[in-house]
Amino acid sequence: MGSICKVIVYTLHRRNWFETNVFDKNMELNMITRGEAKYVYLDSTEKYRGMNTQKYTLTVALNDAEAKKLEELGVKVNTIIDRDTGRRIQVRKFSTRHKLDKEMIQTQSGKVVGADFGPGTAVEVLWKAGVNKSHGVPTFLQAIKLEDEYNPGYKSSNSELSEFINLEKRK
């Protein structure tokens, strides 16, 4: 499967042939991407420059192989400087407009975690591709599977809530 591959399709409702990307025909497929959670905004919607994005998001650090797979599908992968290590890392943000049910975020062994996990946790993200736009193929978050030994706690986009919850867990 590739974003460059073309097929000729005959449509009955239009009664004509047209050329389209093979990838466009597979948009309903669920895909899995593996990586490390970097920024977790699943308890409340993400804020960007003081504005509410109206999206729940998970930004995942990717290894070279995962990044290449996504790029081959037309998904844009960003390179950022890791605040903790100062190294350049490749990341992709997965988002949804609806809060994920707690059951949609669980460990490999099936323990329901909900949004109670933090950066540094190894994750597998189940996602669907959106329509190919000028900014690359959108990645819509469906579910998340964590390693059994995950980092507890989360960073809320509401800094007071995040501080309160993380302080309570340390007691």
Image: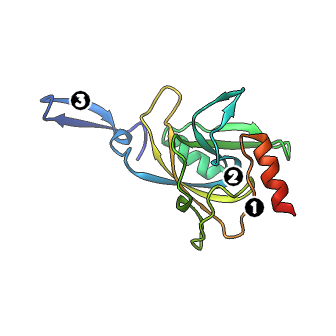
Quarter of the image where one finds residue 132: top left
Tell me if 4 is positioned left or right of 63 in this view: left
Of 3 and 119, the residue lying toward us: 119
Q: Secondary structure at mark 3?
A: strand
Sequence-wise, which precedes: disc 1 or disc 2?
A: 2
Sequence-wise, which precedes: disc 1 or disc 3?
A: 3
Please name the residue shown 61% across and 32% down the image: 53
Tell me if 161 is positioned left or right of 126 in this view: right
Whether the residues at callouts 2 and 3 have beta carbons within 8 Å, the answer is no
Residue annotated with mark 2: 37
Residue density around tag 1, few if under 14, some if 14–19, many if 20 or more, within 10 Å = some
Please name the residue shown 49% across and 25% down the image: 134
Relative image position of residue 115 (x, y in whole percent) = 64, 55
Tell me if 152 is positioned left or right of 94 in this view: right
Residue density around tag 3, few if under 14, some if 14–19, many if 20 or more, within 10 Å = few
Q: Amino acid at mark 1?
A: Asn
Q: CA distance from mark 1 to mark 2?
A: 10 Å
Q: CA distance from mark 1 to mark 3?
A: 49 Å
Residue annotated with mark 3: 18
Front: mark 2 or 3: 2
Relative image position of residue 45 (x, y in whole percent) = 62, 39
Residue density around tag 2, few if under 14, some if 14–19, many if 20 or more, within 10 Å = many
Sequence-wise, which precedes: disc 2 or disc 3?
A: 3
Of 32 and 160, the residue lying toward us: 160
Please name the residue shown 57% across and 71% down the image: 110
Quarter of the image where one finds residue 144: bottom right
Residue annotated with mark 1: 151
Front: mark 1 or 2: 1
Whether the residues at callouts 1 and 2 have beta carbons within 8 Å, the answer is yes
